[in-house]
Amino acid sequence: MPDRNLTRLTIRRPDDWHLHLRDGAMLRAVLPETTRHFARAIIMPNLVPPVVTAAHAAAYRDRILAAIPEGDTFTPLMTLYLTEATDPKDVRAAHAAGIATAVKLYPAGATTNSASGVRDFEKVRPVLEVMAEIGMPLCVHGEVTDHEIDIFDREATFIDRILKPLRKKVPDLKVVMEHVTTQDAVDYVRDSSKNLAATITTHHLIINRNHILAGGIKPHFYCLPVAKREAHRIALVQAAVSGDKRFFLGTDSAPHTDALKLQSCGCAGIFTAPNTMSCLAEVFDAAGKINKLEDFASLNGPRFYGLTPNEDTITLTKGDPVSYPAHIDTEDGPVTVFDPGFDLHWRVEE
Ligand code: DOR
Ligand code: ZN
């Protein structure tokens, strides 16, 4: 039976390998949108101030655990924000105690709250060597920050200038290239023999740069790395639906209030937590690959992180178009939900 005839699909419960939950009122508002469908998530540490130490991560984890809606089961997998002052001993201890699952590398200035990130990569080499030794993955925001590099070329340039030399120096380090947006990144991951994987977001499987810029500027489609031209989006879809174990879901769901998005210098980030599984099912189904959704959303991620897949399952069904709220309300103001621009026919059975 061709995949397209399938109208019901049961998969292991998915995980989100790249998620922004923020803190305080925003955390309480957005967390249920993830715990509804996802069992675990890699939690980004770019709070203000950032989650740098094991003690910060443990305290943040407690705040997340306290905000989980009753009846939901959810495990936040914490990350440490890498700075040039990060202490390798603290990283080792955080990993050994099960407080931190990974370390996040932001090149300084690359994106939201990245000012404390890394400028001189030699300075963090001792941390990376400890991580390689203990098998702790490095999650990488792979964009150079040099002003003379065109924003659409910053990912490809990062691979050549930073990632290739870094992985040569510390070959045993497990690296996740986060939210890849280019054919170049897909090829680089495919060509590597080990210790490299990539997350792909929901929105980068759906939008290209025309969606942001043609026919009027659309701040709700602006994120970093910025969506590229259509050929790159197609390369991402091919990688995601291929079943290749090195590609898995990291939504990068990144809530900002409308007030922060809709201003002359608007924030980067797209909030996809509420409708991510519907969007993904639509993309995989359109590609005739709905049977690969489980690999992408539920199996490949835990495999790379050395964790077991979730035991329980979710069931998606295909039918009349399903609608989602245009925004969710938070005490800080409304947060707009990602609009894929087409009807969604798949829903997660509750
Ligand atoms: O679009 C983005 N938003 N990209 C990032 O790297 C950070 C994120 C955020 O924190 O808002
Ligand atoms: Zn992110």
Image (cartoon, rainbow, N blue to C red):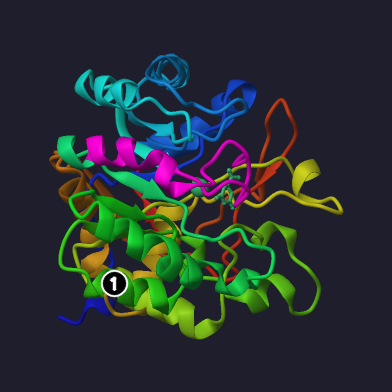
Residue 94, magenta (yes or no): no
Which quarter of the rendering shows the C terminus?
top left
Front residue (pair 165, 254) = 165
Single out the residue that lies furthest toward the right. Answer: 264
Left/right placement of residue 220 relative to residue 226 reads right
Q: Callout 1: few (<14), some (14-19), or many (20+) C-alpha neighbours within 10 Å?
A: many
Residue 223 at x, y = what percent? 61, 57
- Name the residue rendered at 74%, 79% in the picture: 214
Residue at image position (56%, 45%) is 254
Residue 310 visible: no
Q: Quadrant of residue 61?
A: top left
Q: Which residues are magenta?
A: 105-131
> Quick check: 162 above or below 335?
below
Q: Is residue 249 visible?
A: yes
Query: Foreground residue, 295 or 183?
Result: 183
Q: Which residue is mark 1?
A: 241
Image location (x, y in percent) of residue 152: 60, 73
Determine whether, in the image, residue 109 is placed left or right of residue 216: left
Task: Out of 226 and 159, give the one closest to the viewer.
Answer: 159
Residue at 63% over, 40% down: 115
The verdict on residue 112 being magenta is yes
Above-or-below relation of 297 to 209? above
Tell me what residue is drawn at x 19 percent, y 63 percent.
245
How far across and down, in percent of the image, does residue 344 sit? Answer: 48, 65
Which amino acid lies under the numbered mark 1 shown in the image of this protein? Val
Residue 58 lies, in percent from the top left, at: 38, 16
Distance from mark 1 CB to nearest ligand 2 atom below 8 Å: no
Q: Quadrant of the N terminus?
A: bottom left
The foreground one among 250 and 136 is 136
- Up the image or down, 79 lies above or below 322; here it is above
Q: Is residue 113 left or right of residue 283?
A: right
Secondary structure, mark 1, is helix
